[in-house]
Image: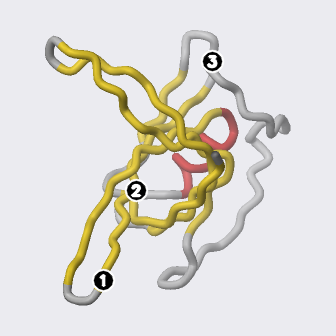
């Protein structure tokens, strides 16, 4: 199911390169919701591949507000002696949220021309 979320990066994105040379980035968005005098904070782990991963790593930093569009999925991780499912938003498009910040668009010719998502 496709979803769009808006939040603030809680830390700098982490870029990794597989032995085959594929790039992947992981980052966490913190979303704040307010209703009356109550406030909730939710964190969502996001992941992206290829040229999108490189663009996120180069453009977004801790504290930046971002809009992420993608599909939710899950991964099984070992937590102590038990397996737990972790919810992840697999990003298909990411950009800065421009309500409280500005951005300058720069075309990066060094990034690959291929825009398809590579699943590692």
- Residue at the spot 21% in from the left edge and 15% down from the top edge: 82
Q: Measured along the vertical axis of the image, is residue 44 above or below residue 9?
A: above
Q: Secondary structure at mark 1?
A: strand
Residue at mark 1 to residue at mark 3: CA–CA distance = 45 Å
Q: Which mark is residue 35?
A: 1
- Residue at the spot 38% in from the left edge and 21% down from the top edge: 76
- Image quadrant containing the N terminus: top right
What residue is disc 3 on? 21
Q: Residue 10 placed where, x, y %?
A: 32, 56
Categorize mark 1 by other alpha carbons within 10 Å: few (<14), some (14-19), many (20+).
few
- Residue at the spot 31% in from the left edge and 80% down from the top edge: 34
Categorize mark 2 by other alpha carbons within 10 Å: few (<14), some (14-19), many (20+).
many
Could you tell whether 47 is left or right of 107 in the image?
left
Could you tell whether 83 is left or right of 21 in the image?
left
- Image quadrant containing the C terminus: top right
Q: Residue 63 placed where, x, y %?
A: 36, 65
Residue at mark 2 to residue at mark 3: CA–CA distance = 26 Å
Front of the two marks 2 and 1? 1
Q: Residue 3 placed where, x, y %?
A: 60, 55
In terms of image quadrants, where is residue 104?
Answer: bottom right
Residue farthest along the left direction in this orientation? 80
Q: Residue 98 placed where, x, y %?
A: 57, 79
Front of the two marks 2 and 3? 2
In terms of image quadrants, where is residue 29?
Answer: bottom left
Front of the two marks 1 and 3? 1
Q: Total of numbered circles in the picture?
A: 3
Q: Secondary structure at mark 2?
A: strand
| Earlier sequence position, callout 2 versus callout 1 | 2
- Colour scheme of the rendered structure: secondary structure
| Earlier sequence position, callout 1 versus callout 3 | 3
Q: Secondary structure at mark 3?
A: loop
What residue is disc 2 on? 29
């Amino acid at each position: 199911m496709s979803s769009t979320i808006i939040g603030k990066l809680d830390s700098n994105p982490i870029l990794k390169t597989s032995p085959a040379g594929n790039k992947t980035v992981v980052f966490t968005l913190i979303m704040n919701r307010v209703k009356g005098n109550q406030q909730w904070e939710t964190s969502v782990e996001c992941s992206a591949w290829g040229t999108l991963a490189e663009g996120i790593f180069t453009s977004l930093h801790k504290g930046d507000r971002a809009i992420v569009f993608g599909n939710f999925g899950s991964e099984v991780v070992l937590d102590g002696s038990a397996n737990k499912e972790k919810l992840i938003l697999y990003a298909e498009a990411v950009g800065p949220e421009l309500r409280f910040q500005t951005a300058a668009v720069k075309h990066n010719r060094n990034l690959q021309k291929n825009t398809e998502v590579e699943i590692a």
